[in-house]
Amino acid sequence: SRPGRDRTMWSRFRLAAPSRVSLRDAGKRCSTVRKVTCGWDDGSEERVPTKRSRPGRHEPPEWNRRNGSSTNWKGKNKRYDDRDSGHRSQYRTSDETPSQRNLRENIRGEALYGIAPVCAALQADRREVHTLYVQEGSDLKQKKDAGAYIAAIQSAKKVGCPIENVSKHELNLLCNYRPHQGLILDADPLDFIHLSEPPPVDDSQKTPVWVVLDEVADPQNFGAIIRSAFFLGTAGIITCARNSAPLSPTVSKASAGALEWVDVHSAKNLPKFLEHCRNDGWAIVGAAAENATMVASQMHLQQPTMLVFGNEGAGLRTNVRTRCTEIVRIGE
């Protein structure tokens, strides 16, 4: 056997009686090594703990001298495999209690968190909602957005959504410790709207602007772009069907709830879609940070425009850049 591997094995198992177990037989006598690792005397059939045994995280329970089973282990959902006796005794695998696990299992859609996304989802009525989870004991006097908090609860009552009061820790587990602000809504997820042909131009908008995202994968950036596009009044948003961030609760939170009000489209082949738009009279404007490009403030919109943003790291792909009629950048 390799010396480095032997040292790792000894340091990992912390054998209490190294002279009784050879390294050559350590792999075959897994049950013996496991007992000795935690300070148990391997020579005793009654498995009496030695004086050097000290309670710790990875120590086995006190063994029943008659059948080798665990008698006083207080863990949950893990199992200890005693290969000599064939008995499996329970021990701990996670910090979740049964009630917390049941609460997560009761989620029928996705856990939408945050006051702004929850309130917008209930008011926009684009999702099928199931349950609103509210943090118990919340002090509205200390909340800066108490008005939106109350409006979200009132909107849930208006649409007939059940409301449950749960602890803050349970809310943290539902959203993986993200900033839920005391509200989590169990609702069905949103889907992309597939778009294969150029969008129709509304007569009320002479020069509509669509935001095109070329493989934007970060949900925070995706949500921030949706928030800005919604605020600035763009005509629509379209992204790639592949290699893009999904419409997740993180995106809705980053968009401050704007995702609940706008339709996000997707194109299966974005370069081909931009080529069709270009042949249909649309201007394809790509955003880049190159000095040779035009400054955005010098550009004048005279026709329907597709404003294309590239990936966070690679920027615009080559096959997308070749479809652009102009390349602009932000001025200094």
Image: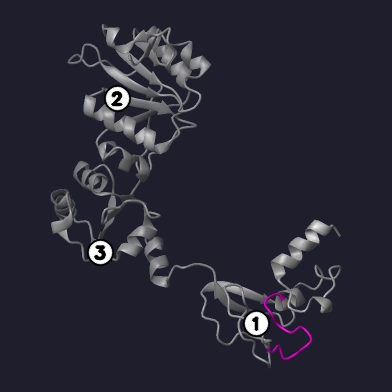
Q: Which residue is mark 3?
A: 164
Name the N-terminal-most of marks 1 and 2.
Answer: 1
Q: Position of residue 273 (x, y in %)?
A: 43, 18
Q: Position of residue 211 (x, y in %)?
A: 33, 22
Answer yes or no: is residue 263 visible: no
Q: What residue lies at 38% left-to-right and 33% top-to-bottom? A: 221
Answer yes or no: is residue 214 visible: yes
Nearest to the eye among marks 1 and 3: give it.
Answer: 1
Q: Looking at the rendering, which quadrant does residue 150 occupy?
A: bottom left
Q: Find the magenta span and give its range.
A: 37-48
Query: Is 293 rendered above or below residue 308?
Result: above
Side (left or right) of 146 relative to 281: left
Name the N-terminal-most of marks 1 and 3.
Answer: 1
Q: Which residue is mark 2?
A: 236
CA gap, disc 2 to disc 3? 36 Å
Is the Cβ of the residue at disc 2 closer than 8 Å to that at disc 3?
Answer: no
Q: Main secondary structure of the magenta part?
A: loop
Nearest to the eye among marks 1 and 2: give it.
Answer: 1
Quick one: 257 or 235, which is closer to the camera? 257
- Quarter of the picture containing the C terminus is top left
Side (left or right) of 330 relative to 310: left
Query: Is 296 rendered above or below residue 65?
Result: above
Name the N-terminal-most of marks 2 and 3.
Answer: 3
> Regarding mark 2 in the picture, which secondary structure is present there?
strand
